[in-house]
Amino acid sequence: LPSMQTSGSKPCPCPSFKLREVASMYFTMIAVFLVILVVALQGSVPHESDFPYKVPLDPQGLLELSWNVSYPEQAVHFQLLVRDLQFGLLFGMSDRGEFENADLVVLWSDGQNSYFGDAWSDAKGQLHMDSQQDYQLLGARRAPEGLYLLFRRAFSTCDPKDYLIEDGTVHLIYGILEKPVHSLQAINISAIHRGLQRVQLLKPNITIPELPSDMKTMEIRAPDVVIPSQETTYWCYMAELPDSFPKHHIIMYEPVITAGNEALVHHMEVFQCAAEFDSFPHYNGPCDSKMKPDRLNYCRHVLAAWAMGAQAFYYPAEAGLAFGGPGSSRYLRLEIHYHNPLVFKGRRDSSGIRLYYTATLRRYDAGIMELGLVYTPVMAIPPGEDAFILTGYCTDKCTQLALPAAGIRIFASQLHTHLAGRKVVTVLSRDGREQQVVNADGHYSPHFQEIRMLKEVVAVFPGDELITTCTYNTEDRSRATVGGFGILEEMCVNYVHYYPQTQLELCKSAVDPGYLHRYFNLVNRFNDEEVCMCPQVSVPQQFFSVPWNTFNRDVLKSLYGFAPISMHCNKSSAIRFPGEWEKQPLPTTTERLREPVPRCPPAPGSRPAAPIPLNLVELRRD
Amino acid sequence: LPSMQTSGSKPCPCPSFKLREVASMYFTMIAVFLVILVVALQGSVPHESDFPYKVPLDPQGLLELSWNVSYPEQAVHFQLLVRDLQFGLLFGMSDRGEFENADLVVLWSDGQNSYFGDAWSDAKGQLHMDSQQDYQLLGARRAPEGLYLLFRRAFSTCDPKDYLIEDGTVHLIYGILEKPVHSLQAINISAIHRGLQRVQLLKPNITIPELPSDMKTMEIRAPDVVIPSQETTYWCYMAELPDSFPKHHIIMYEPVITAGNEALVHHMEVFQCAAEFDSFPHYNGPCDSKMKPDRLNYCRHVLAAWAMGAQAFYYPAEAGLAFGGPGSSRYLRLEIHYHNPLVFKGRRDSSGIRLYYTATLRRYDAGIMELGLVYTPVMAIPPGEDAFILTGYCTDKCTQLALPAAGIRIFASQLHTHLAGRKVVTVLSRDGREQQVVNADGHYSPHFQEIRMLKEVVAVFPGDELITTCTYNTEDRSRATVGGFGILEEMCVNYVHYYPQTQLELCKSAVDPGYLHRYFNLVNRFNDEEVCMCPQVSVPQQFFSVPWNTFNRDVLKSLYGFAPISMHCNKSSAIRFPGEWEKQPLPTTTERLREPVPRCPPAPGSRPAAPIPLNLVELRRD
């Protein structure tokens, strides 16, 4: 695509620009530009109250993004609040938050004129004007708190330089221009103040169920924590339900964030502890502290989870999450991930989660089911892979046995891997034919694990299959990554939230260990006895000793795509449903879902490849 | 893409159309439409003499296509002669000549009005108007011999429904409308008279070298053959050079086709016989006849080859193909493939090839080198594969040893496989980095094997690698296809024509047999001893007994992509260059050629999605 150089090729009003640029650096902090009026409004301009979703982009909260999603228009409307505009800013999206190969909207000023344009960065991070302008500027206004920029972007533009906005995680990137620039091309993207923020941009369009009049609230909050002055802290706080608290239904929950800490509280989860212990120690401190009592590890049953950018979570009208009552622990653990990259000191926080619950039980208890791979080293990823795929199955045999004839309804999902995870998808399959995607995240990040409401509830019936596929990147690793609980081991899990609750808590698989043994044997013979096959050696040790040539890599892939599986069709992590679950045939897929063909609206407002001049009035800040 | 229904949704001038349609069938043979004038001409209209390439489309020669190629415009100009226009015709291109998923230009008439439009057929063969009209009608005129239609098509249109015109074979398709149709959608593509013709559409743009004044010609023609009344005949005719014919250089050759048989003579080759035999029997008859003397099998050294649509073949100015003189046989074998699908009887033919040669030897003798795979069963394709890839290597070690320091120049290439071949490509690689494509055919057909001049001469130096990759389809087979000479066995060969001639006649590879043995062992163990590994069993028998599950397929692919190779770096098919050629490392590629991104010209003449009305005058023919 031709790069746009309109502004660069204009006769430059100031020939000694570079000198002037240097000089202007001294004035940077006091030079503020105010955008007055922009372009003729295209379509209806949304009101400020029309942006239900909000997230701070940078840790200082200088940039704050609000947005809404129009599914009929297949477009997102953005409202970007710039609290301290200097010489412009960059905002955009890229595959995993990198500034190379990114899709960007840029507002830049040469000190006299300002421009707004849809741009892209190449593999070296160099900016180019987009030949098709798909970020449409809808308006800009000055308010006491800063400058508001309003713009619109279709999900899909069919411009190959543009990011395709899909369900799941979107890596937003931003940059702040602290010096004037005479053209888009002159912006040195590696030298500016910049960062990334992950959000679920395409929030589902859910109608909020009616809330009962007897609804009560309970806040699970860590009181007055001093946020540690380090980038990452996981804070643990133990809470307790009242004595003899009867069974209730949680029907909604929402975050409670201490004002001013919006950019620091990254995500929070409330776990219920195991019922087999009568009591749990009180604790209020870092989760990785040596002082943390071991017993807290038995508090792992998720009651609620929130991550940045998420709103309140509503259960469907027919269901609620049971808590309280006999057979359920009174103890709860709150875990807060503080993300403090600027290492602020002494910041105090009392954030947490507010549960909305009712004693008038709804028709169904909601349940959580674990899909994907068993936590076992037999599922491994060779080192140096950019996109290695592992698949976990919930087979027809298991759903046939464990699901009620009327089926279950999945309404939310939380995807989970450890650090090497890059994509996760669960597909519902019936008689070998893929029916629909349950949940998919093509830009999954292990640093952003939300419980996500599904766009539409998925009905699963006895005999259906649920196939969960995870894609991993191990390019930075020198030895195999095996399955397991450790942070450098891997998982491939989808926690699906559904109703009515069944006994089936786990529907996961792993390759048959006997076939893996054949693989090691084969590697051993084929590669002239380099792999230690001594029986006392563990599976991870065997994986670590495989020489990772292309043949051994390829054959491992082939093995996982062929060998029979061991099924965990379990009532709890230890108790299986009765039946034969070893050496089960690998489910086969005879008909795949079609890749959705991106719809490219004829772009009513997409403009020719030229930057749009803006009328700017230069103002001193004080 | 929305299908165009303009003509269908017009108020129909004749409500009882179907009746009229039936009635009109009686008049079909006398109803002829004459296109008088069409649309304003776009760009310069080429003269008739500007179409250097010509091919009959159908066996009767009712449709005759001429064309030229404009590389600066990246477009082809077509001139289609329709000898007996009835109610229109279809012409177009598709991947392998099928009428589904085809790119078509359609001229159709409802008996009153006629229309010309760019259309496409879906996977069921249903026609649709193209949303972007990329076949541009340039003119139409009536001549005594028939109607001439002139139109233009860019190589690449970026319309996903359009065929991308690439180097190599193009499968042209045609259809004849013998009844009026009231709309494009009403054409039943499976019920019309139709067919396919393969051509190399993008002929290279070669400057013809100056021809010497002492040039002589010699015609190798089968005298007065009665073409057998069967679809396929390979005709063999033995010719002889004069006694003591000294060494000459062939510098050009061209076809001599008996007038009227243009649609029957499919391809012709002249072979020189082996010098080790003093004489060869005369023969003039079918090549598969029981009467054909066995010795004719020793006449396999290609001197000249022509296929339908090809023009004269010119050697580069510096080189000629040596024939005559000591150490070279006086005997030549002409082989003609007659393609007679309408089984015409008693048609007489004296076609052949006219050689242009000179006694004033040029600077270099030209040579022919065989690249690709050794003819051995160790290279095999599992059954039921839609695109299985085998690769043959000419390694750096061999070119280092056998090529002169100044290198060789490849100027022409003939790709060769047996019936399962679908694509063939040879790439030149240097230090593991792919440099350029020597010759590629993404729509290769074993039924259309021409010697093709290269667009640009390729220089190959000592240490370079030549990697030949073939793609096979075995979906119609139930057992493995092994390498070999048989028509149901496979080959992967590129005969490259080059100069100066060297001793290297063969530079081919095959997988190391020891590693293949390990594969059979592995399959045996992994699949519970189903494969007979008894030492007396041949490699084909072992392949035939492999149970072709996904694992065994995948591992065979992995083996071919990993195992060391046995190199045939040979002076002739039996004599190797000195050196170690067994268990050679597989060449690795660290840098691949980029896929060319199709350039989509802004389509100066591409029109909105509506059929173009034509002014037609209805004329009775006689």
Image (spheres, coloured by chain):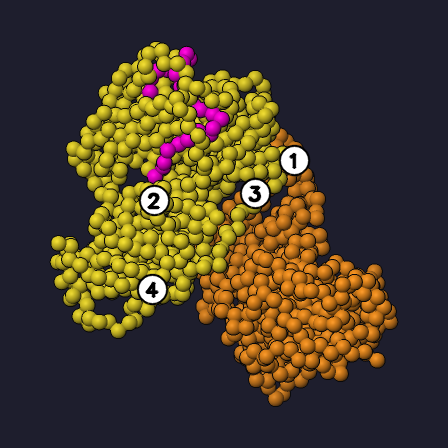
Chain colours: A orange, B yellow
Q: Amino acid at mark 1?
A: Val
Identify the magenta region: B309-332
Mark found first going from the N terminus, 4 or 2: 2
Q: Secondary structure at mark 1?
A: loop
The mark tally for this picture is 4
Q: Which residue is mark 2?
A: B49
- Residue at mark 1 to residue at mark 2: CA–CA distance: 71 Å
Residue neighbourhood size for the residue with mark 4, other residues' Cα within 10 Å, grouped as few (<14), some (14–19), many (≥20):
many
Q: Amino acid at mark 3?
A: Leu
Whether residue A576 is visible here, answered yes or no, is no
- Whether residues under marks 3 and 1 lie with C-beta atoms below 8 angstroms apart, the answer is no
Q: Amino acid at mark 2?
A: Ser
Chain on which label 2 sits: B
Pinpoint residue B406: horizontal percent, then vertical percent: 59, 25
Q: Is residue A26 above or below residue B356?
A: below
Residue neighbourhood size for the residue with mark 3, other residues' Cα within 10 Å, grouped as few (<14), some (14–19), many (≥20):
few
Mark 2 vs mark 3: in front: 2
Which is nearer the eye, A305 or B454? B454
Mark 1 vs mark 2: in front: 2
Q: Is residue B601 above or below residue B462?
A: below
Q: Secondary structure at mark 2?
A: helix
Residue at 33% x, 42% y: name it. B54
- Residue at mark 2 to residue at mark 3: CA–CA distance: 38 Å
Q: Which residue is mark 4?
A: B611
Q: Which residue is mark 1?
A: A531
- Residue at mark 3 to residue at mark 1: CA–CA distance: 36 Å
Q: Is residue B310 magenta?
A: yes
Pinpoint residue A187: horizontal percent, then vertical percent: 72, 61
Chain on which label 4 sits: B
Mark found first going from the N terminus, 2 or 3: 2
